[in-house]
Image (spheres, rainbow, N blue to C red):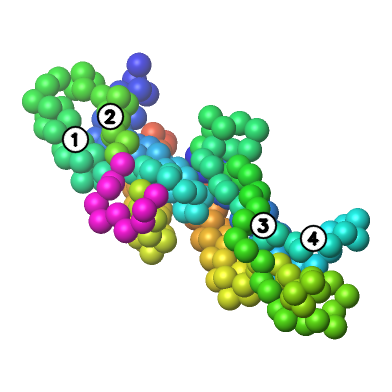
């Protein structure tokens, strides 16, 4: 029954990584340049999960398969005075929608809670079994 | 062996098989909840109704044969992939409410089996104890 706990732990790690990705998106909602200072708006990132534990796909659980880039078009804002504006006077901002990020964040936190509850249940079952000995 | 016969008579092996079933089902439910956001994941489950009918068949078999000849150790429920009422395009039939309810019901069932097993063992212990005074 102990591997039920490992399944829960793998899900907690995966949901935590998803939350980190969402936090990165929200933090970079107005980032118009990359880490080298070149003009390149931040692209929204999202996670893809796959069954099986990280590093041991044969074992039951879940793991983060990849972090993908969202290739939808950037948000364009007309602001000719801005240093980052193009020749047409538009500034390209990241393709991040706060509402979408908010919904994903709630989903991740609910899934995290559900897995914690399942681990609590597993713990209760294991201790009930152990009480047979006492 | 005397102790073997003592432990394998009555309800104890039936309860043990039920507890094993509950533990196996709990593992699958935990896996389903872990994979609630995995695209294309097909849910797995064990059917308690089917397991209980297997159990009652085996019990009837035991009634009609000699003591100790019918065991419950090989009683294995088959893993199913419930596909009823899929609402998602990726064929992952996720329903957090259903999964959590099943998880809680299954845990209560497991706890009940543990309590019953404890009662069984304590009555054997009582029988084995020297008479007081």
Disc 2 crowd rating (10 Å Cα; few below 14, some 14-19, many 20+) is: some
**On residue B54, which mark appears?**
1
Q: Chain of mark 3?
A: A
Single out the residue that lies furthest toward the top.
B1
- Which mark's residue is nearer the viewer, 3 or 4? 4
Part of the protein shown in magenta? B81-90
Disc 4 crowd rating (10 Å Cα; few below 14, some 14-19, many 20+) is: some
Please check whether the numbered discs 4 and 1 fall on a single chain. Answer: no
Upstream in the sequence, badge 3 or badge 4? 4
The residue labelled by disc 2 is B75
B58, B116: nearer the viewer: B58
Residue A63, percent across and down? Answer: 60, 43
Q: Chain of mark 2?
A: B
- Which mark's residue is nearer the viewer, 1 or 3? 3
Q: Is residue A60 left or right of residue B119?
A: right
The residue labelled by disc 3 is A45
What whole-number distance in Å separates the C-alpha atoms at marks 1 and 2?
Answer: 8 Å
Q: Chain of mark 1?
A: B
- Classify B16 as above or below A99: above
Q: Is residue B94 left or right of residue B57?
A: right
**Disc 4 and disc 1 in contact, CB within 8 angstroms:** no
What whole-number distance in Å separates the C-alpha atoms at marks 3 and 4?
Answer: 15 Å
Q: Chain of mark 4?
A: A
B115, B122: nearer the viewer: B115
**Disc 1 and disc 2 in contact, CB within 8 angstroms:** yes
């Amino acid at each position: 029954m102990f591997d039920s706990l490992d399944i829960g732990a793998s899900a907690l790690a995966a949901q935590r990584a998803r939350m980190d990705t969402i936090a990165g998106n929200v933090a970079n909602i107005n980032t118009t340049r990359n880490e080298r200072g070149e003009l390149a708006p931040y692209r929204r990132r999202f996670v893809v999960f796959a069954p099986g534990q990280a590093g041991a796909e044969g074992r039951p659980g879940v793991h983060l398969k990849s972090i993908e880039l969202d290739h939808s078009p950037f948000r364009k804002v007309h602001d000719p005075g801005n240093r980052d504006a193009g020749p047409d006077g538009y500034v390209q901002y990241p393709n991040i929608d706060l509402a979408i990020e908010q919904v994903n964040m709630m989903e991740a936190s609910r899934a995290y809670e559900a897995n914690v509850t399942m681990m609590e249940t597993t713990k209760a079952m294991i201790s009930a079994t152990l009480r047979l000995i006492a | 062996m005397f102790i073997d016969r003592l432990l394998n008579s009555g309800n104890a092996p039936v309860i043990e098989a039920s507890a094993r079933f509950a533990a196996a089902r709990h593992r699958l439910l935990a896996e389903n909840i872990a994979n609630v956001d995995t695209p294309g994941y097909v849910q797995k489950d064990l059917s308690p109704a089917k397991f209980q009918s297997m159990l009652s068949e085996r019990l009837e078999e035991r009634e009609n044969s000699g003591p100790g000849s019918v065991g419950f150790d090989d009683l294995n429920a088959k893993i199913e992939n419930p596909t009823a009422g899929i609402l998602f395009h990726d064929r992952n039939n996720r329903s957090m409410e259903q999964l959590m309810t099943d998880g809680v019901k299954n845990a209560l069932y497991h706890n009940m089996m543990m309590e019953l097993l404890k009662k069984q063992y304590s009555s054997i212990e009582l029988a084995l104890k020297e008479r007081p005074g």
